[in-house]
Image: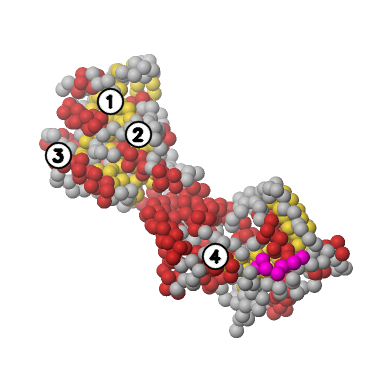
């Protein structure tokens, strides 16, 4: 049976603690101390003094241990008051975090064993003697080196001060002591430097702590990982008691999760250890992992605030009385679940270089220009309805510019567009097809985002702000598309409300599906938002698919092959008007059949793959390494004149924009 708690469990760790003896008069053991106690500290002089006073009560003879205290840049610097019966050395450094502080202290540790304590530790009177005895016992029974982990439950004072601390103490939400078994050997995930001892030379042999990658969190378990590779395993002993005299709050607990996620991501990058990111053996932290992480982060985010509200209420209602077992279990489950939100925030921030939290809390950035690129060809009424809706639903926070490429219309579209003061018009003399026309629009677009919009699409209230939210909350999002009443790739939903009910339907949809999305390999380009950096990296649409058909599949597939993903914004509805004539519908059916073969050949799909059979793309999307087909370059070559190219003119009502353009468009190499 495991031994019970020590009889000297402190009711008040700060009571009846007085310095004893003088360090200068302390007898030095002829062969040096048996144990070095290493303590980093920062801005907590009272806790340091209390810890030293408590160490003065140790049952271990004072000449058998030393204390190495490292002040990590406290202002004002830590000063020691009184004298102590043991050797104590106070070192100072500019603030660099506990990993660097421990490394500095390790340089001065003289004993064969080092016990690492937090500065807020309250050691039992026999703690140091226990650590030495346990190491001797382990050597006698099993041989080899171990790291001895003692207990670190919260102190009675801290538990009494806060129901949240009691919750942490009784569960595995902070330290997993509640599930550890006395005498059991664990692994690196339990190398917690709150109350742990290990051979001093073993730490030095693996290079000490890594303060570059792990300044103030994960530095302990990462060291434990390296020690384990040298044969040092963690053994838990609940008879080596220390208490944690620190009142944690939810305001510090949840932000710690973000730091933890970021640091464990760095650990995974450094060592390839799947357990660092809670992956199964052999599982990769690749695009699929990041897609799941992003989806989970967004899905659980609303619940985090609710749980925080519950914890705040519990803090008031249960102050001064113990939590019931059922309530502890319920709260533990809820906190563990929403704890994934800050953790995954840290993972995503570290991997993507962008913190998603500001967008989650405050929405997309304001003032960034979006270029709306529209292709027009003999459909004046549709073009007018499209542009009028864009004007009607402008959002002050999200400015737009309209770039329209007219492909030789003969129905008055060109003249009407030229008269619009807010339209930059590229007027081609003939029909160059949708891919080439969009590439002309890309060449003129000035925005940080591009939206490729068919001229038979009618946008709805708030459409752009919500698309931008999806684009900005997910740093790996390449293309974002809405749902509509006519589209491929699962973007079509039922809509029977007509023009009069369109806006109300869109607003109701936005409310019922707020911030919901699904990942997609391919999107239709009736309305698709693309980050400028992605659009420029891709190079444009592949004119091998001219005049129309599968250029959008190809474009969004290339975006996905960049190691990114596409999103369908389920809370954004735009209307995609039906074909105005049967002849146009029939022509598009023919083009789809022809260009499917081009798409299939370009992406090496099976020869017998039928129109729309994308199953073989799965292996392509899962493959490692860059695909040379991702970038179409060069797509646009501006020149004064090009043999065989039809002319185009650019008109604008804004100063500084191009006055003329002649270009040649080439297909991608396949």
Secondary structure, mark 1, is: strand
- Of callouts 1 and 4, which one flags the residue occurring earlier in the amino acid sequence? 4
Dot 2 and dot 3 residues touching (CB under 8 Å): no
Label 3 CA crowd tier, 10 Å (few <14, some 14–19, many 20+): few
Image position, residue 314 (x, y; %): 44, 64
Q: Nearer the viewer, mark 3 or mark 4?
A: 4
Nearer to the camera, 631 or 405: 405
Left or right side of 665 for 321 = right
Q: Is residue 130 above or below residue 438?
A: below
Label 1 CA crowd tier, 10 Å (few <14, some 14–19, many 20+): many
The image quarter containing residue 110 is bottom right
Q: Which residue is mark 3?
A: 500
Q: Nearer the viewer, mark 1 or mark 3?
A: 3
Task: Give the numbered dot on residue 398.
Answer: 2
Task: Give the numbered dot on residue 161.
Answer: 4
Dot 2 and dot 1 residues touching (CB under 8 Å): no
Say how the picture is coloured: secondary structure
Q: Which residue is mark 1?
A: 405
Q: Residue at x 41, y 58 (%)?
A: 309
- Alpha-carbon span between mark 3 and mark 4: 60 Å
- Alpha-carbon span between mark 1 and mark 3: 29 Å
Nearer to the camera, 39 or 525: 39
Secondary structure, mark 4, is: helix
The image quarter containing residue 477 is top left
Left or right side of 652 for 326 = right
- Of callouts 1 and 3, which one flags the residue occurring earlier in the amino acid sequence? 1
Label 2 CA crowd tier, 10 Å (few <14, some 14–19, many 20+): some
Q: Residue furthest bottom?
A: 1
Q: Nearer the viewer, mark 2 or mark 1?
A: 2
- Alpha-carbon span between mark 2 and mark 4: 48 Å
- Alpha-carbon span between mark 1 and mark 4: 68 Å
């Amino acid at each position: 049976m495991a031994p019970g708690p020590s009889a000297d469990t402190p009711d008040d760790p700060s009571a009846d603690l007085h310095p004893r003896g003088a360090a200068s008069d302390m007898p030095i053991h002829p062969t040096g101390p048996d144990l070095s106690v290493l303590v980093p500290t920062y801005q907590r002089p009272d806790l340091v003094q209390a810890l030293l006073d408590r160490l003065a009560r140790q049952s271990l003879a004072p000449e058998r241990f030393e204390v190495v205290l490292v002040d990590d840049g406290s202002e004002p610097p830590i000063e020691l008051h009184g004298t102590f019966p043991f050797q104590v050395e106070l070192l100072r450094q500019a603030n660099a975090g506990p990993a660097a502080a421990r490394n500095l202290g390790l340089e001065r540790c003289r004993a064969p064993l080092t016990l690492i304590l937090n500065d807020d530790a309250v050691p039992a009177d026999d703690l140091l003697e226990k650590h030495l005895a346990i190491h001797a016992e382990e050597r006698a029974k099993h041989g080899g080196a171990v790291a001895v982990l003692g207990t670190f439950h919260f102190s009675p004072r801290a538990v009494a001060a806060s129901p949240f601390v009691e919750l942490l103490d009784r569960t595995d939400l902070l330290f997993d002591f509640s599930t550890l078994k006395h005498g059991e050997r664990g692994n690196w995930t339990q190398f917690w430097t709150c109350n742990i001892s290990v051979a001093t030379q073993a730490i030095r042999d693996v290079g000490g702590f890594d303060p570059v990658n792990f300044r103030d969190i994960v530095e302990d378990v990462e060291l434990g990982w390296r020690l384990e590779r040298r044969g040092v395993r963690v053994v838990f002993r609940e008879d080596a008691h220390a208490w944690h005299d620190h009142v944690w709050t939810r305001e510090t607990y949840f932000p710690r999760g973000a730091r933890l996620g970021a640091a464990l991501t760095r650990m995974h990058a450094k060592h390839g250890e799947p357990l660092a990111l809670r992956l199964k053996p052999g599982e990769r932290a690749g695009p699929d992992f990041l897609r799941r992480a992003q989806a989970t982060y967004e899905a659980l985010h609303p619940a985090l605030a609710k749980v925080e509200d519950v914890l705040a209420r519990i803090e008031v209602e249960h102050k001064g009385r113990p939590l019931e077992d059922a309530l502890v279990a319920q709260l533990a489950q809820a906190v563990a679940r929403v704890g994934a939100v800050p953790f995954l925030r840290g993972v995503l921030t570290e991997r993507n270089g962008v913190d998603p939290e500001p967008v989650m809390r405050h929405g997309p950035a304001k003032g960034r220009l979006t270029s709306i690129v529209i292709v027009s060809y003999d459909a004046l009424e549709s073009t007018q309805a499209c542009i009028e809706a864009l004007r009607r639903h402008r959002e002050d926070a999200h400015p737009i510019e309209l770039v329209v490429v007219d492909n030789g219309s003969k129905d008055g579209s060109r003249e009407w567009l030229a008269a619009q003061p807010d339209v930059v018009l590229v007027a081609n003399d003939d029909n160059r097809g949708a891919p080439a026309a969009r590439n002309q629009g890309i060449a003129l677009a000035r925005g940080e985002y591009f939206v490729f919009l068919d001229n038979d699409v009618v946008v709805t209230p708030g459409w752009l702000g919500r698309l931008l939210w999806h684009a900005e909350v997910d740093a790996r999002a390449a293309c974002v598309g809405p749902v509509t009443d006519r589209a491929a790739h699962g973007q079509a939903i039922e809509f029977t409300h007509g023009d009069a009910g369109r806006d109300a339907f869109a607003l109701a949809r936005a409310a019922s599906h707020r911030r919901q999305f699904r990942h997609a390999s391919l999107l239709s380009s009736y309305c698709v938002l693309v980050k400028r950096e992605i659009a420029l990296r891709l190079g444009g649409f592949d004119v091998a698919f001219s005049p129309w058909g599968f250029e959008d599949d190809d474009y969004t597939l290339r975006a996905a092959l960049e190691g990114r993903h596409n999103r369908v914004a389920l809370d954004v509805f735009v209307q995609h008007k039906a074909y105005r004539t049967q002849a146009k519908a029939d022509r598009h059916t023919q083009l789809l059949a022809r260009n499917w073969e081009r798409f299939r050949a370009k992406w090496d799909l099976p020869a017998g793959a039928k129109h729309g059979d994308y199953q073989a793309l799965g292996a392509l999307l899962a493959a490692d390494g860059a695909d040379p087909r991702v970038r179409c370059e060069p797509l646009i070559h501006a020149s004064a004149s090009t043999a065989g190219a039809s002319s185009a003119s650019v008109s604008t009502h804004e100063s500084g924009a191009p006055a003329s353009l002649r270009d040649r468009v080439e297909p991608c190499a396949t």
